[in-house]
Amino acid sequence: MAANPYVLKWGIVSTGWIAQQFVKDLLEDPASRNVTDVAHKIVAVGSRTVESAQKFVTQYAPKEKDIKTYASYTEVFADPNVNAVYIGTPHTLHYENALEALNAGKHVLCEKATTSNAAELKVLLALAKEKKLFFMEALWTRFHPLTLELKRIAEEGTLGDPVVVHADLSADFDIEKLPLTHRMLDPKLGGGALLDLGPYPLFWAMLSLYEHPSNKNARPTSITGSMVTTPITGVDASTSFTVNFTEHLRAQAVLSCSMTVPTAPFGATIRYKNGNIIVKPPIFRSPSFTVQYYDKPGGEVVREETKTFKYVGGGWHFEADEVARCLRDGKLESDSWGHEKSIIVMEIFDEVRRQGKYILPEGVEKVDRVQ
Ligand SMILES: NC(=O)c1ccc[n+]([C@@H]2O[C@H](COP(=O)([O-])OP(=O)(O)OC[C@H]3O[C@@H](n4cnc5c(N)ncnc54)[C@H](OP(=O)(O)O)[C@@H]3O)[C@@H](O)[C@H]2O)c1
């Protein structure tokens, strides 16, 4: 540990599955991932009931002293000891939770899908800017060592420009057995495959196409989407979408997600002029990727290299370290996963939902989306 690491004091909002994973990772010793400049402290946990907040602390942070437990999220936002809040509620609640956090003067790390629509996200980002507060979508995969190394290889030049990306994230949620109020099924909670699983295939398109230097930060030029709904509640069971980047590249992403079948074995495959990068599933936390190099453009694979990555913890601590470093350095957004990327992602989801005719119930979207 460095003599004086910057210590970020977190307030945790909600106690569900992802909040549990995030808190477990916050409590990993940063030195176990060779981090010495920042550290994390959990100072408050808020839940809809105080019993749940207390149970959460007992179970996931038993050795931590002085964590305040609250029977509401509002009390976490009001706690003067909290620097930043982590929001782990279902998608359609993110907007109101983040709005309240920002209005209370807290920096925010908000789970994906960031909001119900791009219009909501824009309101949050404008408020964050006005109040000089940090806001980041919790796109944890962007901060993994595997992602950083893949990006370095992809952009170093040998592979040439990207041409086609295929990526899938699916999981069989056994939806026939889920209660209708489960967040994957309930349209009021933004249920369905797209908003829950879609951020990951889209992430690989954003990383390999949008972020590629040859793309010069150009936004997608066209989007198509197709949804298959479940008769259970009408949310999307399977969705496929394409995203083209043709202003500076001639590139296309072919993406899919389903909540009724296991994930596709090809994971994410990025095809370049001079080779391929194949990211092993699960693409949210891939263990390895393989780079294939052709002998000449359009030729045969003559060299192949696989890189494997291991670390202590679940992999959510890397995004927490990013938040801590940004706050330490006075940044209002991450250079790696900043506001513009989160807006593009939400605009793509809006468009795919529009084409797939997936309309959230009246009143769920708190800010009207542009039709
Ligand atoms: N980054 C990742 O790897 C990852 C993985 C899974 C999920 N996620 C995201 O995290 C969010 C939550 O997912 P999850 O799997 O953690 O869900 P979950 O287990 O259902 O937990 C959600 C929590 O939100 C709170 N909540 C408040 N109002 C609620 C309502 N009306 N219905 C249900 N819960 C409500 C509850 O906490 P209290 O009772 O304590 O208030 C609940 O435990 C989603 O946006 C999802 O996309 C991210």
Image (cartoon, rainbow, N blue to C red):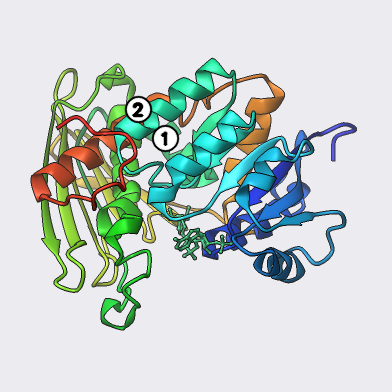
Distance between mark 1 and mark 2 Cα atoms: 9 Å
Q: Is residue 359 in view from this perspective?
A: yes
Instruction: Name the outermost residue toward the front.
Output: 363
Q: Are marks 1 and 2 in contact (CB under 8 Å)?
A: yes
State yes or no: Cβ of the residue under disc 2 lies below 8 Å from any atom of ligand 1.
no
Residue labelled with disc 2: 211
Tell whether circle 1 marks a residue whose Cβ is less than 8 angstroms from ligand 1: no
Check the image and report above or below for 145 versus 156.
Answer: below
- The 10 Å Cα crowd at callout 2, few under 14, some 14 to 19, many 20 or more, is some
Residue 242 drawn at (x, y percent): 14, 42
Q: Earlier in the sequence, mark 1 or mark 2?
A: 1
Name which residue type carries label 1.
Lys
Asked whether, in this view, residue 122 is left or right of residue 347, the answer is right
> Going 33% across and 65% down the picture, which residue do you hit?
184
Q: Nearer the viewer, residue 68 or 301?
A: 68
Report crowding for label 1: few under 14, some 14 to 19, many 20 or more residues within 10 A (C-alpha): some
Q: Amino acid at mark 2?
A: Glu
Q: Residue at x 27, y 32 (%)?
A: 209
Counting from the top left corner in percent of width and height, residue 316 is at 57, 51
Using the rendered view, name the quadrant where residue 36 is placed: top right
Residue situated in front as seen by the camera: 145 or 154 = 145
Direction from residue 16 to residue 126 in the image, left or right: left
Task: Tell me the tag on residue 151.
Answer: 1
